[in-house]
Image: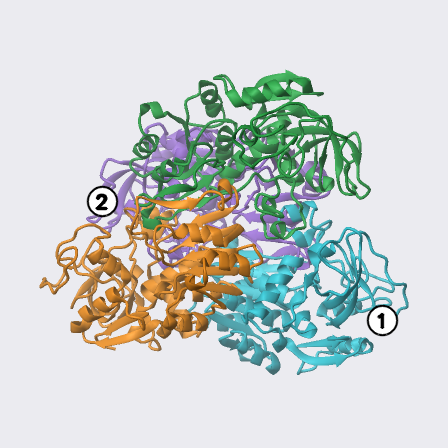
Chain colours: A green, B orange, C purple, D cyan
Amino acid sequence: MKRIGEVGWVEKDIPSIGPMDALLKPLAIAPCTSDVHTVWEGAIGERHDLILGHEAIGVVEKVGSMVKTIKPGDRVIVPAITPDWGTDAAQRGFSSQTGTPLGGWKYSNEKDGSMAEYFTCNEADFNLAILPDDISPADACMLVDMWSTGFMGAENASIPLGGSVAVLGIGAVGLSAILGAKLQGAARIFAVGTRPVSIIVSKEYGATDIISYKDGDTSEQIVEATGGEGVDAVIIAGGGPDILIDAIKSARAGSIISNINYFGQGDTLPIPRVEWGFGMADKDIHTGLCPGGRTRMERLADIVTYKKGDPSKLITHKFNGLENIEEALFLMKDKPKDLIKPVVIIDD
Amino acid sequence: MKRIGEVGWVEKDIPSIGPMDALLKPLAIAPCTSDVHTVWEGAIGERHDLILGHEAIGVVEKVGSMVKTIKPGDRVIVPAITPDWGTDAAQRGFSSQTGTPLGGWKYSNEKDGSMAEYFTCNEADFNLAILPDDISPADACMLVDMWSTGFMGAENASIPLGGSVAVLGIGAVGLSAILGAKLQGAARIFAVGTRPVSIIVSKEYGATDIISYKDGDTSEQIVEATGGEGVDAVIIAGGGPDILIDAIKSARAGSIISNINYFGQGDTLPIPRVEWGFGMADKDIHTGLCPGGRTRMERLADIVTYKKGDPSKLITHKFNGLENIEEALFLMKDKPKDLIKPVVIIDD
Amino acid sequence: MKRIGEVGWVEKDIPSIGPMDALLKPLAIAPCTSDVHTVWEGAIGERHDLILGHEAIGVVEKVGSMVKTIKPGDRVIVPAITPDWGTDAAQRGFSSQTGTPLGGWKYSNEKDGSMAEYFTCNEADFNLAILPDDISPADACMLVDMWSTGFMGAENASIPLGGSVAVLGIGAVGLSAILGAKLQGAARIFAVGTRPVSIIVSKEYGATDIISYKDGDTSEQIVEATGGEGVDAVIIAGGGPDILIDAIKSARAGSIISNINYFGQGDTLPIPRVEWGFGMADKDIHTGLCPGGRTRMERLADIVTYKKGDPSKLITHKFNGLENIEEALFLMKDKPKDLIKPVVIIDD
Amino acid sequence: MKRIGEVGWVEKDIPSIGPMDALLKPLAIAPCTSDVHTVWEGAIGERHDLILGHEAIGVVEKVGSMVKTIKPGDRVIVPAITPDWGTDAAQRGFSSQTGTPLGGWKYSNEKDGSMAEYFTCNEADFNLAILPDDISPADACMLVDMWSTGFMGAENASIPLGGSVAVLGIGAVGLSAILGAKLQGAARIFAVGTRPVSIIVSKEYGATDIISYKDGDTSEQIVEATGGEGVDAVIIAGGGPDILIDAIKSARAGSIISNINYFGQGDTLPIPRVEWGFGMADKDIHTGLCPGGRTRMERLADIVTYKKGDPSKLITHKFNGLENIEEALFLMKDKPKDLIKPVVIIDD
């Protein structure tokens, strides 16, 4: 990213590292819709010559003097969110909010990202997880943000075992939320979206009902399908400023609306007063930022290793070589019909 | 209530009761702001000859054939919310939402209220609690809605032990939320309001900082007082449609906004996008309707009996005799400066 | 059950019902290990001419005058546990403990069970769930106790997404706990047991590692397989008085031991002091009794309908006709090698 | 501590510190019963020339090169438990169990304690809290272990607002648990103990009923006083190996037993089978080790600053000068009748 609206290659020195950090080379990289927000929507404000990218698997080149459990040559999963684990927010239980709000998000925000020959990771012992042999770098790339964010959407939704869930949006994060909902015990899962390639994966991940805006108001369809009640939980995984209206209309009295959507527009986001029960209908709204850190990554990897979920289903496009990252990024920007998620493989 | 905007006395038959119900005579009654909303703002829609009132202590006149533990002559606490305990919403853990959204609220909503010579209670065994001898009917009137709602505001806020809380609004419910916050372990408690009579009680109930809009933007004052961070929890106990903006601005990343406010106006309620961290700052919004039922009332009574809180502090005006209920109701409507809560004592 | 140690047929009148009850005829019945405990171990004390059975699907013959949503002819799922939903314990959130400890358990305990031509259900509107057309009575029989208990074992274990779980015992309840663990997000699931027929189902239900006592101390095997750490959660689904020792040894510091085992012997049950961290290692012990009621049954049925789990895998033996219930019961008592669970089908 | 059973002064070099550590001089020190366990009961095994002490307030002498927010001259609260905040156990939410079970406990366990001219603290930025001016070092000494442990006992007990609690043992930790129970919303609080000096403080901290073994079996007294039900929560704050029996007998079906007792004796600890409902009565057993770290200390300090609790009530004996630490330690060992907690003030 050269500036808002313009991307291109930038020549920089190999970054230096502190005593707890690691220097990494990428094995696989995935561009994220957030990168698109950053460049073309100016989501995090102006940046000059910022290296993009926060979804990567890497190999360790060098480690700082205090790093104990990670060593050069290790192939590692690099979470999108790399908290400062000792800080107040982490001690309070909000490790993604360390330092400042959303402060756990450093790559292509506070510092250069992973779309580079070299990139770094803070608190390497506590943020990097060893990549198991049975998971490819490309597949593992789906864990660091997509799965971690989507699964968080389901975890924050406190889904009762056998409960009903609606997932609004079936991009890569929404699909991950569907799988997350299944892994949290949902029985009936409504997937709201229309892209055929996503609909196929949504069913493989556990969706039971596909809802399309082409058949009318989506929240009305969900309410009708649940006997006028609405669902136990709604996960917002896409949509514009008004999506909270759909979400709250789709939810029953006594439910949770769990947001994993990045809201990029609007001064304010509207809650529908009457359907929210005048503020008294027990329709809670939960939010969060993708959980990061080593333990999270290890647990997500275990889901793959022990065959409770398959991340490869999210990958629709594969590129080979760092030089193709720009093409992958534009793919993410243009979103052709057959796209869920592209990955650039540098070395697997 | 004769119709929207008009109150007066209505002559009705003594209500009949079902096998699980009780017929009651009031010992003490308190008018509620909700009654004002109902009559003068048409909050729940048009009603004809509806008897108002949902805050009452009564004496049992008669019970249905299946009632086992409550008997004529018992002096009882009558919760504002009287759930149907077997229904789906109660089994799901949302007893205030039984039947329909907010369906646990029956008095002066689905049926006649308690501002009458006689009134009834459904599922008497499970909704009525015996009034302990050491609590006066007037004091106990503060438990059935004010304390139960205000305390819920604190319970839903998941306050960390030693955490900071801001309570927006210091009417009777806001004051109860302050006491609730203290009983849930809050250390620093900001009370946002200006009425002198309420400020005194807020301090007695545990508030440590009084914030007035006269000194500038209230959320900015709270953020500044907390070193730029904001508080661990915000309880909304009053305010117009825009109060969510203040609440979210006052809350730190990683916090809970707990609403106990009835939102009476506006098609939608605005959430401030940036301060909400674009939907990712872990600022959750919790809601609910006053918990009812026998066990809740028994526990609130125990708080009085075992001297962990004093409900009499909320009562600023006492009337004697049912005939003065209209005066008390107009007091609630006009809100003179020295008012927190009036009670009408019929027999103590 | 004629008395402890003796079973046989008893002639009784058709039971009478109260205004909220239903009279039922069984469609399918399953004997339970608890029935064996009751008869041959005297687990609940002496009983005379008590009709056994608490796992049944039925058809409604008659309903009481106050029953609204269930009517004669309805095919219904009858939970093993049928709480009194208004009572204090249910209001406190412990619906299986209504009235007395374990008081939600009425069949073949407080009253006659379902191994009869007719049996009754209290609070029919709130305890009976309509049997969906796509579930057979035999399959549905697996939900009322086995699945509900086993799943509770997993729910009470607060399994982190991607976490590791050990299930001690792989009878029908243990297998259900394995499926429950998968539905709660476990990645690696250790199944401790040796019966070949159960091992097959345990893998189909999500187990990844089979642990046998024949290969050495089972807790040592689990600790070793997890790098010396132990698992995030242990579910006890069988075993004698000493099983808590195995459980606590298998669990890491910071974990939950979730018990669904009926402890039938021993004055006291031993906790190993050192491995429990002298009472300070954050190894919590959770317990509970099978959740009952209509909403629970509806949710379990949804898990079948929406293909998140298959209860038929538990059924190894099917009998036709009420007259074969004795044979099925003795099968349960003798536990041949190829048995998981027998069902007696009266009418499907 | 020279060896098990023998204490005395040891000459050592000033300890060296790492880049994240701080070197401290004590301002106030309190000996703990754990020190007594360590020396005279060999609780943590043999140790040679180990400096005792883990309850201290200090002044910073020197900090490591990476320490940012703590500087020489700062007066700081030093938690008894100083976790390694990045490690796996902390990321899992169990910061007191970092490294090994109970691994957050370093002072006078893994390394020298604070009963010395100099001592150190790991991860100084994240474990040390600035001592507010309005709290004396002696008072603050009560926070680092006694309050933090006792309050945890109440937090882990999930006390319902207005619920009933029994605290078994009224030493300094038990008294802190009583205050904690009040701050978590308990109404009725049973204090089980006999020492007159403790009984006075227990009442000031919120106890409503004093139970003495001299009046009969304590659990029977509690059950009787609660109408045959038992309490919502039991906090074990003292007692021998059999104390779990009392605790479980005192608890109602649907309750939590929260342990903060160090169990020093017995191979196994007995749970009473029948009163535990055969493992099915929803009587959960929670455990834990004193929470440490900077945020915890800051919150406890806020409780003092904002007058929600007074730690000075625990201090019955004050000494001046490090040389009197031995006398204070022996006081702790001998437990005279008028003792709750001694403090040695070096400099306030």
How many angstroms separate mark 1 from mark 2 (CA)?
Answer: 76 Å
Which residue is at the front of the view, D257 or C17? D257
Circle 2: element type: loop
Q: Which residue is at a point 31% across and 53% down the rendered structure image?
A: B85
Quadrant where the image shows the N terminus of chain B: bottom left
Which residue is at the front of the view, B273 or C171? B273
Three-letter code for the amino acid on which mark 2 is drawn: Lys
Mark 1 sits on what residue? Answer: D6
Q: Which residue is at a point 73% across and 65% down the rendered structure image?
A: D74
Three-letter code for the amino acid on which mark 1 is drawn: Glu
Do marks 1 and 2 share a chain?
Answer: no
Residue D112 seen in render: yes
Chain label for disc 1? D
Callout 1: few (<14), some (14-19), or many (20+) C-alpha neighbours within 10 Å?
few
Residue C127: x percent and y percent? 33, 45
Mark 2 sits on what residue? Answer: C68
